[in-house]
Amino acid sequence: MSETPTTGSVEAQPHVFRDRSFRLFFTARTIAVAGAAVTGVAMPILVFDISRSPFLTSLAAAGTVLPYLVFGLFAGAVADRVNRRTVILCAQALAALALASIPAAQALGVLTAWHAVGVSMCIGTCFVWFDAAAFGALPALVGRQRIPAANSALWTSSTLIDVVFPAIAGVLVASIGPAYALGADALAYVLAGLAMASIGASFSMTPAAPKKSGTGIARDIREGLNFLWQSPLLRALTGVGFVNSLTQGAVTALLVVYASERLGISTSSPMIGAVWTAVSVGGVVGALVLPRLPAQWPVGAITVGALTIAPVVLFVVATTGNAGAAITALVVYSGCATVTILNGIGARQRLTPDRLQGRVNTTARMVAWGGSPVGALIAGAIAGRWDIGTAYLVACIFALVGALFAWASALRTDPYPHK
C-alpha cells in the first residue's frame, strides 16, 4: 500500500518529497530522462551522419513512439492486471541492452542506420510497457490529492534536465561520436532500474486483478475505451492531443536537419544541441506556467489558448533564417505543446479510477502519440522531396488544424476548473 494517505485535503498531507517512495521514483525518472536527453540528440545525428537521409532520420524519431500504436491498448490492459513493478523493471532492462548494442556494433565496425532505427523502435516498445505501469504507480505512491504536485515535480525536473543535457550531449557527441554517446543512456537505464527496485511501497492501490484469458483482456480494453469515450472533456483532450502530437512529430523529428540546412550548424559542432535546448526551455516554461493557470481558466480554455498560439510561432520557425528568431519561436511553441500535454495527463489521472489507470492513460496516449510517427514521416518525406522550410510549413498547417479542432470541441465550453 501507499506510504501516504490517498484521501483528505492537499494541505493535510506532507509534501511529496517527504515520501521516500516518491523520492526514489523521482530519482529513477530523473536519471532515465537525463539519459534519454542524450539519446534525443545523439540518435538523429547518428542516423543522419550515416545515411544523410531526412526520411531515415525522421523514421528513427518515429520509431520511439510508433510502438504505442501497436502495443498501447494491450500494454495498458496487462499493466492493470500484473505487478507494475515487474513491468517497469523488465522494460528498463531491455532498453538498456538495446542501447548498449549500438556502441558495441560501432566498435565492431558493423553499425548501420537501420540498426539504429531498430534500436529506436525497441526503446519505444519498452517505453509503452513502462508508461502503462508508471501511470498507475504514481497515484498509488503519492495519493490522488498529490498527483498535480508529483506530476509538476517530475515534469519540471525532466524539462530542466532537457535544457542542460542537449548542450552536454552536443559536446559529448562532438568528442566521442554519437554511437558511443548512446552508451550513456544505457547506463542511465541501469541506474534508474536500481532506484525503482529500491521502492518498498506497493505500485497499486488495490491488488492486481487475476489473470484471465484473451477474451478477458479484450473486455478490459473495451472498458478503458468506453470510460475515455464517455467523458466529453477527456475525449476532446485526447482528440487535440493527437493533432498536437502530429505537429510535434513533424517538428522534432527534423531538428537536426533544420539546424544543419536552415541555421547552418554543423552536426559535428557542440552548438548542434542548441535547437534541442530551445525546445527544452519551452518545456520548462510550460511546466512552470501551467500550475498557475487553473485559478483563472478551466481545463478547456487552457488547452484552447495554447493550441491557438502554436501555429503562429511555427510559421516563424518555417519562414525565418535567423537563428535567434527561430530559437525564440521554438521556445514558445514547445511551451504551448507542453501545456497541452500536461493538461490532458493531469485531467486523466485525477478522473480515472485506479483499476483503469493503465488502460485509460495508455489508450489516450496511444491515440495522441499516434500522430507523432505520422507527422515525422510526412515531414521527412516532404523535406527529402522539397526542403526543410516546406516541411515545417506543413507542421504549421497541422497546428492550425489543431487550434480549429479545439475551438469547435467541448473544450471551448468546458466550465470546470482544473482542480
Image (cartoon, grey):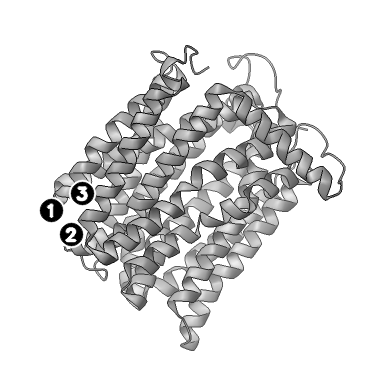
Can you say which quadrant of the picture contains the N terminus? top right
Q: In screen coordinates, is 147 left or right of 389? A: right
Q: Are the residues at dot 1 and dot 3 in contact (C-beta closer than 8 Å)?
A: no
Q: Residue at x 37, y 75 (%)?
A: 176
Question: Percent x, y for residue 70?
Answer: 61, 55
Query: For mark 2, does the 10 Å Cα neighbourhood hold few (<14), some (14 to 19), or many (20 or more) residues?
Result: many
Question: Alpha carbon of mark 1 to alpha carbon of mark 2: how far?
Answer: 6 Å
* Along the viewing direction, whichever of 259 and 72 lies nearer the viewer: 72
Circle 2 sits in a helix, a strand or a loop, which is it? helix
Residue type (three-letter) at the residue carrying disc 1:
Gly
What residue did someone put label 1 on? 321
Quadrant housing residue 79: top right
Looking at the image, can residue 410 be seen? yes
Label 3's element?
A: helix
Disc number placed over residue 251 in the picture, else none: none
Q: Is residue 2 visible?
A: no
Which residue is disc 2 drawn over? Answer: 262
For disc 3, the marked residue is 318
